[in-house]
Image: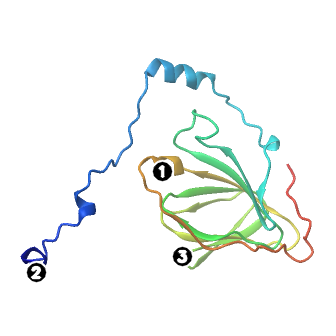
Amino acid sequence: MTAEEAAGDVKWERWQKKRVFVREVAGKYGELYRSLLEQPRVFKSKDMKWKGGPTKFGKNVVNPQATQVTQAIETHIDVLAPGSYGQRHGHINSAVFFILSGKGYDVHDGVRIDWEEGDAAIVENACVHQHFNADPDHEARILVFKAKPTFLFFNLLFQKNVVYPPSEPMKGFESFQPEG
């Protein structure tokens, strides 16, 4: 053991490396501005395909990959099949969920929070949570708003799935597909 190690003054190599904590934003303002003016202002979610299944479906509607107009927010639509649920997961960014249709509940860090059509539910930063459709006969449709792109910009990337949604359809809904 060296004297440095004995004194607790060990300098890990990873702490000595140069790091970039904020990414560069570069470009000519006039060109960026003109490009932003040319971006679409309406996105037809009905023209987008659903991904996922057989119990949880989603489609990304607005995000920085689709448009440069919204560099700080992301919006997607999720559908939970009747009586189903999504993955239990956590992420650094908060999220606002607007319930377009259905009724259900979330479990946030072990606490149940009920919601129904017309409600807005908030998932706070770093919360482990899961969404459940409590209606055994109808889908739940949820519009999600996140500042995830901003968190990615600052390299706050932590996101983890703890439990995945079911890989088998719910009984009686083997052919379920969301509309629109």
Left or right: residue 13 compared with residue 41: left
Q: Give the position of the N terminus as an image quadrant.
A: bottom left
Tell me which amino acid carries mark 3: Asp
Q: How many residues crowd mark 1 within 10 Å: few (<14), some (14–19), many (20+)?
A: some
Left or right: residue 104 compared with residue 13: right
- For the point 89% across and 70% down, which residue is it? 137
Alpha carbons under labels 1 and 2: distance apart: 39 Å
Q: In what element is the residue under mark 2?
A: helix
User: Residue 171: image x %, image y %?
Assistant: 89, 77
Residue behind mark 1: 152
- For the point 61% across and 41% down, which residue is it? 65
- Residue at the left extreme, as displayed: 3
Q: How many residues crowd mark 3 within 10 Å: few (<14), some (14–19), many (20+)?
A: few
Left or right: residue 86 compared with residue 96: right
Based on the displayed image, in which of its 4 quarters is residue 3 positioned?
Answer: bottom left
Alpha carbons under labels 1 and 3: distance apart: 23 Å
Residue behind mark 3: 109
Alpha carbons under labels 2 and 3: distance apart: 41 Å
Ranked by sequence position, the earlier of labels 2 and 3 is: 2
Based on the displayed image, in which of its 4 quarters is residue 82 positioned?
Answer: bottom right
Pick the residue in front: 113 or 89. 89
User: Residue 99: image x %, image y %?
Assistant: 72, 58
Residue behind mark 2: 6
Q: In what element is the residue under mark 1?
A: helix
Tell me which amino acid carries mark 2: Ala
Proximity of marks 1 and 3: CB atoms separated by less than 8 Å: no
Mark in front: 1 vs 3: 1
Q: In what element is the residue under mark 3?
A: loop
Mark in front: 1 vs 2: 2
User: Residue 101: image x %, image y %?
Assistant: 79, 58
